[in-house]
């Protein structure tokens, strides 16, 4: 995990005062998603670019397909995320 051992990110914040949370820091993956750089001239281009950002994010976390952290249904869903997915799938993928 990229941020394991990076307690300095939380020092000075009230959450860091609780030892329970200090012990958890760095034990779960953090997924960062931003659409700040997504620019388009129309709805179709915007939708395509947002889907591409989400597909890239799923690719970055493809390691989740290894082992048994995902159920068969979750694994199938994960594999169905693509830059040309329909709108309902994109909404669920974002969730």
Image (cartoon, rainbow, N blue to C red):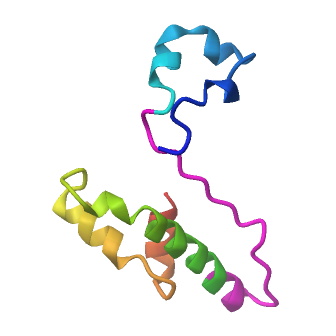
The residue sitting at 65% across, 82% down in the picture is 49
> Residue 37, located in which quarter of the rendered image?
bottom right
Residue 32 magenta-highlighted: yes
In the image: residue 54, left or right of residue 35: left
Residue 88 or residue 49, whichever sits in front: 49
Q: In the picture shown, does residue 47 fall above or below 94?
A: below
Left or right? Give the position of 13 relative to 16.
right
Residue 79 position within the rendered picture, expressed as x and y whole percent measured from the top left: 32, 75
Task: Identify the residue at horizontal 46%, vertical 83% (top origin).
Answer: 85
Q: Is residue 5 left or right of residue 79?
A: right
Q: Main secondary structure of the magenta part?
A: loop
Coordinates of residue 35 in the picture (x, y in percent): 71, 66
Query: Which of the pair 11/91 is nearer the observer?
Result: 11
Residue 6, placed above or below residue 22: below
Residue 44, image x, y percentages: 67, 90
Task: Give the number of callouts.
Answer: 0
Query: Which residue is more in the foreground, 63 or 86?
Result: 63
Instruction: Please say if 36 is above or below 11.
Output: below
Q: Is residue 82 magenta?
A: no
Magenta span of residues: 27-47
Image quadrant assignment for residue 75: bottom left
Q: Residue furthest front?
A: 5
Please determine whether, in this image, residue 93 is positioned above or below residue 3.
below
Give the residue displayed 63% in from the left and 17% down from the top: 15
Q: Position of residue 64 (x, y in %)?
A: 32, 58
Q: Quadrant of residue 89?
A: bottom left
Q: Residue at x 62, y 9 (%)?
A: 17
């Amino acid at each position: 995990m990229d941020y394991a051992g990076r307690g300095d990110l939380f020092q000075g914040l009230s959450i860091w005062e609780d030892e329970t949370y200090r012990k958890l820091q760095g034990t779960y993956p953090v997924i960062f998603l931003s659409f700040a750089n997504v620019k388009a001239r129309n709805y179709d281009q915007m939708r395509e670019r947002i889907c591409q950002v989400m597909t890239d994010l799923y690719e970055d976390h493809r390691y989740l397909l290894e082992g048994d952290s995902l159920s068969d249904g979750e694994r199938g869903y994960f594999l169905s995320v693509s830059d040309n997915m329909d709108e309902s799938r994109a909404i669920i993928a974002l969730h």
